Amino acid sequence: MANLKCKIKSVLLMMSLLIIVEASKEYHINHGWDLAHATFYGDISGQETMYGACGYGNLFEQGYGLETAALSTALFNDGLACGSCYEIHCTNSTWCRNGGGPIRVTATNFCPPWYQDTPAAWCNPPRKHFDLSLKMFLKIAEYRGGVVPVYYRKVMCPKVGGIKFELKGNPYWLLVLVYNVGGVGNVVAVDIKGSKSDWTQMTRNWGQNWQTWVRLQGQSLSFRVSTSDGKTKQFMDVAPENWQLNQTYEAKGNM
């Protein structure tokens, strides 16, 4: 009889836990959250997270720091998700710590697929996965956990100052890195205008680097930026007539 009572209690406890998990899942989905998994790469210094597939270069210098993530194919959108901000918290794992978060990170890199039949291939399609800097992973989970289930949702990106445009290339080809973007954060289209020319649509080279072959030397440069939420803003005379390559110019506003 005592064993039967223990078994009944165990079954009831498991049923209660399942009900709690399902209720939590329903709550999160109804409030804009989705399920994914998270791991980490690199050491606590975060050096391995620099110079990723979004083209931001040194993340400390560009203002992103270590509050970053590499996205799996299902989330990366061939680089158009670069700059997006996400809120993430650990869930349903004994390895969750400090309440499991939430943390906020910016997409700055790509977690490539590994097409082998292995449990370690977390970034393979169609999996939604965040490869975090170690610093951010340790805010939501124990190091020994390695990989944990998470809830995530896209959020607004708080930024200080205006959008920044880093000019690169050569006299015949202009490459512009667009970063420090507020609002939803990820840019999907860029137009450029010289003070003596009309608006020209730029094409995306890679990550958040946008290019044009229109020669704009000796003209002040204006930009028209569109983000994934359909918002478009113009930033006039961002760079002066004597602009130089390998220089960064900051707009007076943001998204």
Image: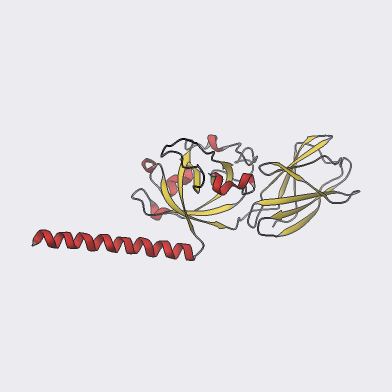
x and y percent of residue 39 in the render? 45, 43
Q: Nearer the viewer, residue 68 or 8?
A: 8
Residue 23 makes an appearance in the image: yes
Q: Quadrant of the C terminus?
A: bottom right
x and y percent of residue 234 in the render? 78, 56
Q: Nearer the viewer, residue 252 or 231?
A: 231
Residue 63 makes an appearance in the image: no
x and y percent of residue 192 in the render? 81, 48
Would residue 69 be found to the left or right of residue 90 on screen? right
* Residue in the picture at 60% in, 41% down: 59
Quadrant for residue 172, please give it.
top right
Name the outermost residue toward the right. 196
Q: Nearer the viewer, residue 50 or 26?
A: 26
Relative height, residue 227 to residue 131 (above, below): below
* Residue in the picture at 83% in, 41% down: 243
* Residue in the picture at 43% in, 45% down: 138
